[in-house]
Image (cartoon, rainbow, N blue to C red):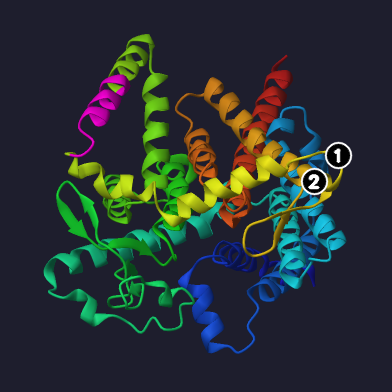
Amino acid sequence: MSNRLSIFYTPCLYLAILLFLLGEGTVALDFARSIIPGYSHSFVTILIMIGVIFLGFIKGINRKTINMMFSSRLIFAGLPIIFFVLASYIDIVINLFSSNVSFSYAAFLIRHLLFIFLVLQAIACGESFIRITKPYFHLMLFILITGATLFLLNIVVDNINNYTVDVGFLRKSGEGNLGRSLYSMPFGMGLLITGQNLANFLGFNFYQFSSYFFEPQIFGFMMVPGFIIFLQKNYRPDFGLKTPMILVAMVLIIWAHSLTTLSALLGIGFVWLFLRNIYSAIFILTIFIILLLVVIANLDELSLTISLINKLNSSSSETSINLFTEIWQNLSFIGDGAFNIRVGEKGRYLSAFSLLLWGSFVIAVFFNIAIEILINKNSAFAYALLFLFICYFKDLWHLPMSPISIYLCLIFFAYKFNQEHIHNAYQRLEYSKI
């Protein structure tokens, strides 16, 4: 019985992880809602995850790895996961006492708790690192292939926006500020932001690319960590086209033209170069100061920066700044502010305690970045987490709760668990030789 059921475990695990990743800000989610009346992505994902967890128990768990979260060598890698769970739970409790709880709040908590348990159980069941990351790798590969195809079509096809797929099912399609739909989806190969002003890069005007995500920023936040991690051969399925993958990723990132993504990439690039040696550190500091002075002195003449600098005054940036300001002004660990701070136009609630826990989650992520870089200054996992960490400052209320955020923390934990397993095996081998 168990052997028959266990053959479904790996493909169902793949499906559960993929559905979890596609659960926010994607074309797939809105498409499913448009063709299936009353479709609830949370409900479907939760059911599938419960089924996969059941199959995992049928398959059998190696009891020796149940205590992996309490391993002295894994305690720091587990801290972001622990703080994420605590912050999510406190948010639900506070919203419940604020009479503001809804199905979406409860579904968020249940979906993320099940996903965390699912991935930890998969690690405990002996699932390889590649199997846990394969859905993410395939999603990244799909985005690269469709994005490259759309880029080539955009060059050779005149008026490519006339070949768009109907995007009326997208809930944000009516937000264009030029009197037309915000998006175009030529040949179904990905979204172009055609309903707002053109982006500008080195004198070229173009529509921003966002792949199958609602915003270029979401595309960057979701996919760039994957581009970084899978550059390392040992942590991706067999795939030899490394150089073309890098070139395509760079083109798509520039085409998306997200200030958050480009700033985060610039930041991790500076860190990587700074850590090479003392000479590169001095060089980077010198270049940074020179570039800063040049930009300040020639701000009006630099076409490279025009569209990016304009985004600093965008409504999205102003909303984020106002949210941080309002939280700071009302923050209190005593009195009303301890358990109930109303922020934002949508009636969202944030307390001092939940803010403390979400801040602790972000700090725990940074702590793991610092430790990992000290161990290996070329670690792809450190730079993938560093990319997320820099992006968090765009919106502390939204981005840390994104599916990719906890998934990357779980991937990092799986990577450290794999290292711990290899270390223990090596110690046993050395001990047997004595």
Residue denoted by label 1: 334
Q: Main secondary structure of the magenta part?
A: helix
User: Is 294 covered by the magenta stretch?
Assistant: yes
Residue 198 in the image: above or below residue 390? below
Q: Residue 415, position in %: x, y?
A: 60, 39
Task: Label 1, secondary structure: give it.
Answer: loop
Q: Amino acid at mark 1?
A: Ile
Residue 8 in the image: above or below residue 140? below
Asked whether 257 or 368 is in front, the reply is 257
Q: Are marks 1 and 2 in contact (CB under 8 Å)?
A: yes
Q: Is residue 241 visible?
A: no
Task: Label 2, secondary structure: give it.
Answer: helix
Residue 36 in the image: above or below residue 8? below
> In the rendered structure, which segment of residues is drawn in magenta?
288-300
Q: Amino acid at mark 2?
A: Gly
Give me the disc on residue 337: 2
Q: Quadrant of the N terminus?
A: bottom right
Q: Residue 265, position in %: x, y?
A: 39, 39
- Badge 2 local density, few (<14 within 10 Å), some, or many (20+)? some
- Badge 1 local density, few (<14 within 10 Å), some, or many (20+)? few
